[in-house]
Image: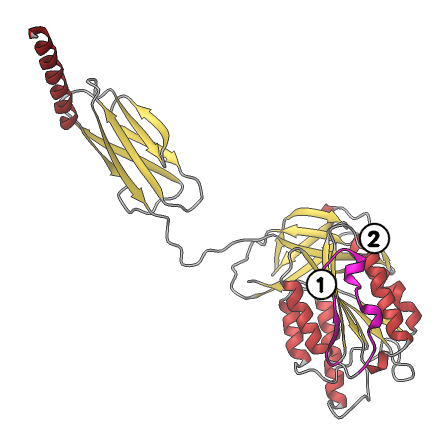
């Protein structure tokens, strides 16, 4: 019993000595302080007080060991990276007797009143010479200027970029008979020519929405019920073009609107000026298949002299010019169709153009998300080549 008592006494004395050593050992983080804002490279400073020696001080960040020092000064630099997060810093001092002391501080992310995210800006460019598309331009032949500042291209593609399209077909009374049937056949041919990742939604309208299909790649889905649609009523072109712009804005990637109409609105609640402003802010490219009314207009001409109970001649002319301007501003195209039999070939022409466009990507050097208009100019070094692309974008 005496030997057991002596052993117990020895263990108690050793434990007390260790506890005394632990109680004597203290460590604290002098930098950074609790609640500091930190990001990037940071110096951790530890202060150790003890009557004995210290064998090591371990440094940890977010429960991960980042270093170990065996002699003072106990300072260590760590790189937290560019991500703006809260962090937990910890130091552990250890004595030769096995005792140790710890200290933790928590820091906060840097407060940001307005964080600017620079997104890739993409331009869809059609290049032609004497009306024929050019397919062999190189990246070094393009120059992109964004609000008077040259930009460096970071991506370059030729065609093959998937798109999401809304096809708007005017089915007002003037489109009755073969005109509407051929127009719907043209839309079906466009859908049939799509590639695997393309999506299309078809909207048939007059003074109201007559038929609408969901965004889809399959022809049987995109054209469901179109064959039974009849032409009737007036034309609310402005209202439905505005809706189409809103719909494609909700989609990702390359966005396209194809409008088949004579361009004359008679029943919309929205003015064309409102739609033009929406198109200006949109990233969608608008292509217009303009159907001429036989005997009333010259090919490519303005609808001069047209008037009705809803619009004066000047109002029709202004609306027509705003629509024309909007199409060109987005980098789209205008195809004038004098005979309905041409409609399908025009739809396929637009599809081929989408397949053969150049896609230029760059990170704007002067983007601030401040709602300002950025004028963009695309030039090409090769002589005689005409470029068509969006004229700019709103910096949101």
| Viewer-nearest residue: 261 or 212 | 212
The color scheme shown is secondary structure
From this viewpoint, is residue 244 visible?
A: yes
- The image quadrant that residue 5 belongs to is top left
Quarter placement of the C terminus:
bottom right
Question: Vertically, is 364 above or below 234?
Answer: above
Horizontal relation, residue 380 to residue 346: left or right: left
The numbered dot on residue 247 is none
Q: Position of residue 50 (x, y in %)?
A: 15, 25
| Viewer-nearest residue: 18 or 387 | 18
Horizontal relation, residue 84 to residue 224: left or right: left
230 within the magenta span? yes
User: Residue visible at 83% across and 53% down?
Assistant: 134
- The image quadrant that residue 99 belongs to is top left
Q: Where is residue 147 in the image (x, y as percent from the top left)?
A: 60, 61
- The image quadrant that residue 262 belongs to is bottom right
Question: Vertically, is 189 above or below 56?
Answer: below
User: Residue visible at 71% across and 71% down?
Assistant: 326
Question: Vertically, is 178 above or below 357?
Answer: below
User: Residue visible at 78% across and 81% down?
Assistant: 264
Quarter placement of the N terminus:
top left
Please name the residue that numbered disc 2 is placed on. Answer: 134
Q: Give the range drawn in magenta.
A: 207-232
23 within the magenta span? no
């Amino acid at each position: 019993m005496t030997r057991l008592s002596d052993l117990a006494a020895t263990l108690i004395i050793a434990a007390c000595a260790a506890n005394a050593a632990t109680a004597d050992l203290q460590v604290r983080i002098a930098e950074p302080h609790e609640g500091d804002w930190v990001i990037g490279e940071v110096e951790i400073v530890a202060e150790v007080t003890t009557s004995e020696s210290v064998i090591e001080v371990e440094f940890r960040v977010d429960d991960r060991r980042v270093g170990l020092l065996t002699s003072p000064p106990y300072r260590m630099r760590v790189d937290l990276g560019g991500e703006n997060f809260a962090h937990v810093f910890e130091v552990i001092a250890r004595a030769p007797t096995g005792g140790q002391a710890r200290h933790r501080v928590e820091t906060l992310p840097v407060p940001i009143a307005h964080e600017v995210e620079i997104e890739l800006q993409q331009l869809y460019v059609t290049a032609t010479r004497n009306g024929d598309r050019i397919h062999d331009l190189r990246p070094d032949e393009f120059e992109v200027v964004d609000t008077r500042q040259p930009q460096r291209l970071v991506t370059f593609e030729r065609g093959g970029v998937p798109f999401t399209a809304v096809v708007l077909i005017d089915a007002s009374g003037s489109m009755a008979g073969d005109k509407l049937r051929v127009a719907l056949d043209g839309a079906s041919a466009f859908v049939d020519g799509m590639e695997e990742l393309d999506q299309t939604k078809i909207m048939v309208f007059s003074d109201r929405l007559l038929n609408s299909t969901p965004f889809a790649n399959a022809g049987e889905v995109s054209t469901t019920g179109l064959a039974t649609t009849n032409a009737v009523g007036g034309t609310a072109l402005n209202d439905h073009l505005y809706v189409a712009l809103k719909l494609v804005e909700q989609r990702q990637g390359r966005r396209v609107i194809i409008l088949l109409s004579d361009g004359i609105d008679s029943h919309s609640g929205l003015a064309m000026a409102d739609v033009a402003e929406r198109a200006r802010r949109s990233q969608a490219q608008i292509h217009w298949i303009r159907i001429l009314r036989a005997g009333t207009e010259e090919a490519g001409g303005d609808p001069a002299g047209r008037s009705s109970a809803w619009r004066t001649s000047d109002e029709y002319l202004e609306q027509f010019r705003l629509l024309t301007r909007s199409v060109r501003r987005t980098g789209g195209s205008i195809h004038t169709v004098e005979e309905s039999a041409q409609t399908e070939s025009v739809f396929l022409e637009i599809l081929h153009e989408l397949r053969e466009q150049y896609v230029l990507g760059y990170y704007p050097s002067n983007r601030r998300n401040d709602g300002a208009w950025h004028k963009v100019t695309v030039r090409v070094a090769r002589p005689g080549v005409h470029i068509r692309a969006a004229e700019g974008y709103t910096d949101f």
